Image: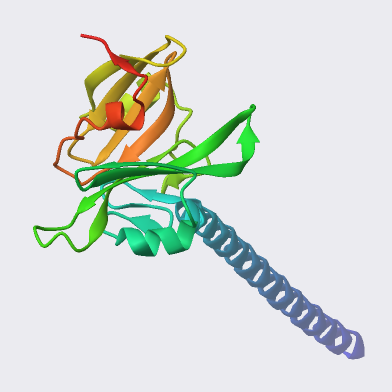
Amino acid sequence: MGAAIFQTEFVRHCSSVMKLYKMIFLGLSLSLFACTSNRKAEVSAVAETVKDEGKIKIAEKFLIVPGRSSGEISLGDDVQVVAKLLGKADLSDAAMGKAWGIWYSRDSTHGKRNEVAIYSAYRDTSMRIKEVKQIRITASQFKTRDGFSTGRSLNDTQLKFPGMKQMASYLNEKQDTVVIYDSMQDGISFEFLNGKSIALTIHPANQPLNNTYLTLHPDWKPIN
């Protein structure tokens, strides 16, 4: 009789222990699942953050917005304000209320100084304020929000701006052929030398790039 009672109690004890182990195992499984889910969520969040950062990591002073601005300079800005920002131009040429101002960088890339050129004209018939009409840059650190800049091939640039059309061709001072393409609807144009862009110009969207290159480069000769 005593043996039967002992056996029954032993079975109950074993059953309780098994239930306890099952509960512990279930708890560990749930914890592991929660940790895994949280880890996936963290990885996903990090991925989204990296993705978002990839869109906005261009410093504002180097950000290109076609049809609007390049760095800290925007179309329509008062030239006097721009002069305070950039200082005195290294080169300038003015005639009949229109002007080019060129600022060279202190450093150089492959032995060539980068430049920012501003084309300006009077804002209206009052002829009191000259405003920025075009912004031309050569430095590759200036980029669009998705990282597009100078130094790209003609094919890459056409893929990015499919509406781009050839505007003109010139022989530069070294007798190299420079080809100008303009994406009028986007407000951006590119100069290509040997198949790669060497400069870009920001101008008002849906307005053709006016023929100012002969003023900027008087030694260039147009190719018919």
Q: Nearer the viewer, residue 50 or 117?
A: 117
Whether residue 43 can be seen here: yes
Question: Which residue in the rendered view is the most extreme toward the front?
Answer: 95
Horizontal side of 150 relative to 210 (left or right) equals: right
Q: State whether residue 63 is above or below residue 221.
A: below
Tell me which corner region of the image, top left, top right, bottom left or bottom right, holds residue 218: top left
Q: State whether residue 116 is above or below residue 42.
A: above
How many numbered marks have been drawn onto this rendered protein structure?
0
Question: Which residue in the rendered view is the most extreme toward the right?
Answer: 3
Q: Where is residue 210 drawn, in percent x and y?
A: 19, 34
Quadrant assignment for the N terminus: bottom right
Horizontal side of 4 relative to 25 (left or right) equals: right
Quadrant assignment for the C terminus: top left
Horizontal side of 171 relative to 205 (left or right) equals: right
Residue lying at 81% horizontally and 84% vertically, measured from the top left: 13
Q: Nearer the viewer, residue 5 or 82?
A: 82
Tell me which corner region of the image, top left, top right, bottom left or bottom right, holds residue 123: bottom left
Whether residue 147 can be seen here: no
Q: Where is residue 170 drawn, in percent x and y?
A: 31, 15
Is the image coloured rainbow, by chain, by secondary structure, or in one colour? rainbow
Residue lying at 33% horizontally and 58% vertically, measured from the top left: 79
Q: Where is residue 174 drawn, in percent x and y?
A: 47, 12
Residue lying at 69% horizontally and 77% vertically, measured from the top left: 23
Q: Where is residue 180 drawn, in percent x and y?
A: 30, 23
Horizontal side of 107 relative to 194 (left or right) equals: right
